Each structure stands twice: as structure tokens, then as C-alpha cells.
Amino acid sequence: MSIRICHISTVHSVKDIRIFIKECLSLSENGYEVFYVVTNNKNEIINNVQIVALSETNSRFIRIFFKPFSALIKALNTKSSLYHLHDPELMPIGWLLRLFGKKVIYDAHENLAKDIIDKPWIKPTFLRKSISILAHTAEQFSYLVLNGIIGATENIYEQFGKRKSVLIRNLPVLSLIESAAASKIEKGDKIILVFTGGLTRIRGIEEMLSAMKFLSNDYELWIAGTWDEVDLQKDCANNDGWRKCKYFGQLDQLTAYGLMKIADAGMLTYLPAANHLEAMPNKPFEYMACSLPMVLSDFLYWKNLFGDSAVYVNPKSPQSIADGVMKIFSENGLKEKMAANAKRMIDNSLSWESEEKVLINFYHKILNQ
């Protein structure tokens, strides 16, 4: 009988890139029997991963304080050998699982303490600092109580002791990107800039659109993703840059890669929120795997990480973003040089295929304790 593993999330989607596409599928392909407890409209099996459905809720209060315990009951019913948690509000059920004698991993996707400081829905504002300190304390307690901690970036990993933690980065699945067919959408003679992902104010979508006003009609911005709020979508539709934009809605991963493969540059101009300054999002690595030069926020961490694969701009300044775009296409040979640098970095070491080995070894270590 194969070893059962249960991943749990009350926040992420069924086909979340890190949880499902990378971790669950990798574990399944390595012989584990994988369950994923997640919000969905039904129990089902997707690519040999057994989806255990949680009910949808529009209440943040219910999601944070009650839904984890519904997830706990369903997770225990899987009778798994190891439980892998993906959300901060799941830490208390991780502690309970340990009381029940279960092996538990907590996967820290974000720098939680910094992320809370930037949460606009936590009011009054002065509470954020106190909640941030409490969250950091909970994570450190989890390090002591749980069997292992996974950090998605170096700065997250370094918050925990090395004995029980490991760094597993959000790097692209090269085989998946290579299998994606280039989109057949006709782009004519336009220079295509692409952004795919969550469409939120803090990720700089409004400034990105405003930058299009400073570019000639030779440029077009293609965006795909889900709007964080209805008012933001309305504001963007009223932005003068919208007329130079094509919106494709929410796309599956392969279709999104198809857009990237025919685009001319990738855009990622996150605003300088505390949790962004040392973030390691999927998107730049996916752009690099598609041999795209990039326009990125001028965060020092990103400059050191991505080097000559991008131009770096002030994400709060539409003019700076536009200037960065024009630099790529006006300097002779720069576009080709940046694209080659990006692909070389990815092929050498920056892929999920290398991170997968770290994940499997970490599982072996914990399961054999």
C-alpha cells in the first residue's frame, strides 16, 4: 500500500500552481497516494490526486475561524501518514494533529508578519502590528511543535531554524511550459507586453495601465487573470490606457503560457508593499522560461535575483514603467540579450524539476523519523 499524503488549504484553489501543479502532482508521480482538502463543488480525482471538497464561504470570519476545523475532520478521514498545511489559519489544526500523533508540515508561502502589515481589511490600522507579532509567534511555535517547515523564499526560510526547515522555491515546471503550444492569436505588427496573474491594486495593475498612455500605438498590453474587486475592474476600464489593452479573463495554465510564448516582454510591477520587497513570485520565472525580457519593480532583492534578464522601474510611476518598456525595444540587441540571459538562468538551475528533489527528500526525512 502506498503512503498517503494530505494537503490542506482553505484559501487556495483546486489547481493552485504551487500546491496542486507542483507539490501534489510531484508527490503522486513519485508513488504517494495524494489527497487535497480544498474548496471545491464536489469530491473528484484530478490527475490521480483525490480532491476532498470543502464548502465555499464568502465570510472571511468563517473561513479563518471555522473552516479549518471542517478541513481537519475531512483530513483525518483520509487516514494519511503526513499532513501538509498551506495557510496561516491552519496552524492551530496542525497543533491538534500533532496532539493526535500525526506528522505535519507547514508550508509558509508568504512572509506572514509583513503580509499582515499590508492588509487593508484589518481595521483599525494600529491592530496590524499586534496581529503581525502574534502571527510571527504562532509560526515560531509551529516550528517547535510541527515536524517540518517549508519556506517558499530565502527570507521566509531564514526565519526558522535549519534543523526542521527547508527552502522550496516557486520555480516553473519546465516540462509543462515546454509542452504548451504557442497561442495562435494574431498580434499583427504590435509589440505585445503581457501580464498574467491576480489583478489587484497592490500588484500595480493601475500603474501598468497608466504607463500605456506614454507608449505609442505600436504597443499593446495583454492581461489575463481574476479581478480582486469589482470596483478595481471598473476603474481600470475607465483608465485611458485600457484602449491599448486586451483582457483575456482567467486562463488555464497552458493557455497562459501560450500567450507568453508569442509576447515580446513580460510585466511584473508590484507596488513596494512590505511583503513584496523580498517576494519570489512565479511569474518572472515563467517569463524567463518563455525567453521573455522583463520589466520588473526596482526592488533590490529582484535586481540581485534576476540580474540582466530585466529592466527595473519605479512601480509607482507610470512614466518610469513606460521608459523601461521603451528601453528594451530601443537599444540595439538588448531584447535578445535579456531573453538569452533569462533562458540560460532557468535552464541552469531555476526550475521546479530541481526543487521537486528537495521536496521528496524532505518527505523521506520526516516520514522516516
Image: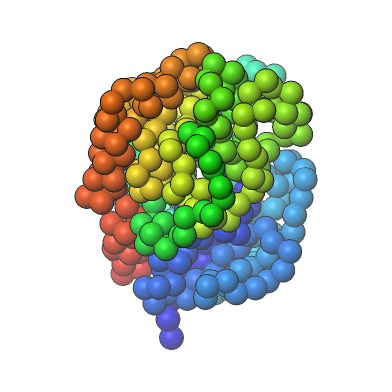
In the picture, measured across the screen, residue 135 lies left or right of residue 147, that is right
At 47% from the left edge and 55% from the top edge, which residue is drawn?
A: 182
Pick the residue in front: 107 or 208: 208
In the picture, measured across the screen, residue 34 lies left or right of residue 41, that is left
Res 72 → quadrant: bottom right
Q: Number of callouts in the render?
A: 0
Q: Is residue 101 visible?
A: no
In the picture, measured across the screen, residue 335 lies left or right of residue 267, that is left
In the rendered view, tell whether residue 144 sits above or below residue 240.
below
Q: By what rule are the colours in the image chosen?
A: rainbow
Q: Position of residue 224 (x, y in %)?
A: 60, 43
- Give the residue at the far bottom of this rendering: 1
| Quarter of the picture holding the C terminus | bottom left
In the rendered view, tell whether residue 103 sits above or below residue 92.
below
| Quarter of the picture holding the N terminus | bottom left
Pick the residue in front: 313 or 73: 313
At 54% from the left edge and 54% from the top edge, which residue is drawn?
A: 184
Q: Position of residue 163 (x, y in %)?
A: 27, 49
Res 199 → quadrant: top right
At 76% from the left edge and 50% from the top edge, which residue is drawn?
A: 57
Pick the residue in front: 234 or 10: 234
Q: Position of residue 204 (x, y in %)?
A: 56, 26
Q: Position of residue 159 (x, y in %)?
A: 36, 36
In the picture, measured across the screen, residue 206 lies left or right of residue 161, that is right
Q: Is residue 24 visible?
A: yes
In the rendered view, tell whether residue 363 sits above or below residue 63.
below
- Give the residue at the far front of this rendering: 189
At 36% from the left edge and 26% from the top edge, which residue is drawn?
A: 328
